[in-house]
């Protein structure tokens, strides 16, 4: 399989920087939000929406039903989703600055009935994968070849309901379902390994009958190639991609700091972050 | 009077099959209780459109949410305890928040679950479901009404919770009955007291009204199958006439029919009210009829309580 070209990688590098700047600016402006987990998953979202997913923005497009579905199960990374949706043309970038404000379509956690393009409302952890299973079942019933992508956090897979869905996806042989685990190894109260010791997430999924890959979640080519392979796998198994990531990736003082899970940067911190990310937005 | 008894659950199963034949978007889901909930009838007829998720009620509700987003109409069944309790937050956040088109048809509500005892007797489900925005809550009183409520749910776009009685119930309605989501049903005119009920206690209330009548008390009987959205008009009109209202439900007196009626009365037309149901306690094992008697929900016991109340 052909990987991304150098120019494609350069382009993704630039756009991911811009998306990171937008994420931080939005959170700073709202004075609330979740920078750490948004920055850890943004490269995955960028590759999915730019390269791997069949994205259809216009609801009146005849191919709208054929669009691939994306579910941000770790809904607190909403800033990442909104930045990438604006980039894909779901709404004007200017609207990003309404994030988390009264009356905004850009709710603190994604809200499907307020914002077109958000497939399902998420935020309460441990529910996105089941919703993805439901979509995948329904699409298969209709002989619709669209794929369902679900992004979970690694802390999120501590939720028991995730494993209910993991078992069901295997039992129903859903090879139109591709899950990502944003394995940044941190949750609100600290290290995932100190709190509930996840260990090898890939082995856990394999034990439940899934195809499992482990990648560097900030390497555009790895994200791209693994996702493309997963899309083509037809072995009647769902696929999980465990993406090893860095919480707060791209901002020196946020990287690998659990404290930046749900805290907005102040003016100075934002300025420093934007400088590190190559611009003033 | 000779009564015929039918199983609302069997009616549910049959109705699903009939609906499934008409509409290919109807899918049915269960969590390993398809023999009890009678969704097995649909499973047999339409195996491709039946999904058993195993003993996993949270997954059941959220998977249904996903199915609804791609145009399916999921009818989801398990016992009321697990539907409304175990999966409450999934119902709230994954289904009701975005008003997804999921129909939750829960069987085994109330103490009439019987021998299985308190762990399986949902006495809080109506309260739990009623408090969620966008949810419609229906408690049919017999098989015919169960059928029509299911048919309504299939047509209506949005989440619905229907509590389907476990035990066989006496026929109250025939095919001339027309279930109306907006209207309560006045089953007997009266002037001395209004008795409001639904579900499997309705037949006891009807019998109770006869006992009261023999004592010279003319009770008005209102069947209120749709606890949410509630038909305020019928409740207020009757209360205005009789000045005394009694609610009877196979549910905790906290949060269910009694609470819904008291909210309407208190805010519009304060009226003397007696809520009869399970008094903030857990149930226990026993035969359904014995339990109704023990908790004061049979016609005889109801007539005693109501006579005392209106003295």
Image (cartoon, coloured by chain):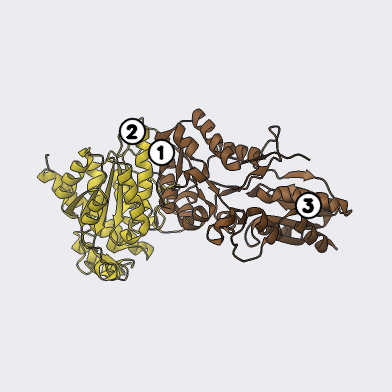
Q: Which mark is residue A230?
A: none
Element marked by disc 2: loop
Kindly indicate the quadrant of the structure image that contains residue A23.
bottom left
Q: Which mark is residue B70?
A: 1
Quote the CA–CA distance across marks 3 and 2.
56 Å
Q: Which mark is residue B208?
A: 3
Residue at x 32% of width, y 44% of height: A171
Q: Colour of chain B?
A: brown
Element marked by disc 1: loop
Marks 2/1 in contact by CB < 8 Å: the verdict is yes
Q: Label 2 belongs to which residue?
A: A144
Q: Is residue B183 above or below residue A260?
A: above
Element marked by disc 3: helix
Residue at x 76% of width, y 44% of height: B186
Residue at x 77% of width, y 44% of height: B187
Q: Residues within 10 Å of mark 1 (few under 14, many from 20)?
A: some
Marks 1/3 in contact by CB < 8 Å: the verdict is no
Q: N-terminal of the two: label 1 or label 3?
A: 1
Q: Position of residue B8 (x, y in %)?
A: 60, 42
Chain under label 2?
A
Q: Position of residue B290 (x, y in %)?
A: 67, 57
């Amino acid at each position: 399989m052909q990987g991304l070209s150098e120019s494609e990688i350069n382009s993704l590098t630039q756009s991911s920087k811009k998306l990171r700047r937008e994420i931080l600016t939005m959170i700073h402006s709202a004075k609330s939000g979740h920078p750490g987990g948004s920055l850890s998953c943004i490269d995955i979202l960028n590759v999915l929406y730019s390269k791997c997913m069949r994205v259809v923005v216009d609801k009146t497009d005849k191919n709208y039903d054929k669009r691939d579905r994306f579910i941000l199960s770790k809904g607190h990374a909403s800033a990442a989703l909104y930045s990438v949706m604006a980039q894909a043309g779901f709404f004007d970038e200017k609207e990003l600055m309404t994030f988390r404000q009264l009356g905004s379509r850009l709710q603190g956690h994604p809200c499907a009935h307020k914002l077109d393009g958000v497939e399902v409302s998420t935020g309460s952890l441990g529910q996105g994968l089941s919703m993805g299973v439901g979509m995948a079942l329904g699409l298969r019933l209709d002989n619709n070849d669209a794929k369902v992508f679900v992004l979970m956090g690694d802390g999120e897979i501590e939720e028991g309901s995730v494993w209910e869905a993991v078992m069901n996806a295997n039992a129903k042989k859903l090879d139109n379902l591709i899950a990502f685990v944003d394995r940044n190894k941190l949750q609100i109260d600290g290290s995932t390994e100190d709190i509930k010791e996840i260990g090898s997430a890939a082995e856990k999924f394999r034990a439940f009958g899934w195809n499992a890959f482990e990648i560097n979640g900030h390497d555009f080519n790895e994200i791209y190639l693994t996702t493309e392979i997963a899309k083509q796998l037809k072995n009647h198994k769902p696929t999980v991609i465990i993406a090893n990531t860095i919480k707060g990736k791209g901002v020196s003082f946020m990287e690998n700091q659990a404290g930046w899970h749900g805290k907005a940067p102040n003016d100075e911190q934002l300025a420093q972050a934007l400088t590190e990310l190559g611009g003033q937005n | 009077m000779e009564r015929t008894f039918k199983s609302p659950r069997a009616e549910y199963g049959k109705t699903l099959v009939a609906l499934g034949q008409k509409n290919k978007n109807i899918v049915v889901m269960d969590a390993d209780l398809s023999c009890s909930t009678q969704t097995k009838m649909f499973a047999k007829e339409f195996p491709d459109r039946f999904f058993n998720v195993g003993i996993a009620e949270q997954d059941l509700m959220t998977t249904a949410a996903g199915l609804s987003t791609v145009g399916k109409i999921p009818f989801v069944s398990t016992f009321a305890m697990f539907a409304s309790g175990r999966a409450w937050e999934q119902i709230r956040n994954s289904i009701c928040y975005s008003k997804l088109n999921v129909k939750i048809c829960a069987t085994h509500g109330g103490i009439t679950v019987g021998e299985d005892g308190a762990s399986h007797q949902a006495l809080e489900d109506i309260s739990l479901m009623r408090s969620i925005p966008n949810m419609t809550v229906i408690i049919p009183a017999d098989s015919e009404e169960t059928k029509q409520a299911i048919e309504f749910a299939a047509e209506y776009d949005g989440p619905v919770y229907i509590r389907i009685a476990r035990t066989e119930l006496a026929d109250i309605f025939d095919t001339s009955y027309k279930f109306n989501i907006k209207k309560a049903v006045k089953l007997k005119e009266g002037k001395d007291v209004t008795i409001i009920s639904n579900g499997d206690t309705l037949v006891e209330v009807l019998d109770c009204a006869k006992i009261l009548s023999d004592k010279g008390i003319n009770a008005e009987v209102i069947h209120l199958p749709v606890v949410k959205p509630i038909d305020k008009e019928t409740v207020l009109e009757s209360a205005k006439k009789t000045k005394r209202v009694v609610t009877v439900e196979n549910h905790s007196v906290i949060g269910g029919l009694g609470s819904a009626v008291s909210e309407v009365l208190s805010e519009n037309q304060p009226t003397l009210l007696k809520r009869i149901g399970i008094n903030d306690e857990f149930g226990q094992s026993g035969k359904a009829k014995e339990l109704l008697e023990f908790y004061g929900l049979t016609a005889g016991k109801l007539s005693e309580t109501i006579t005392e109340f209106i003295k």
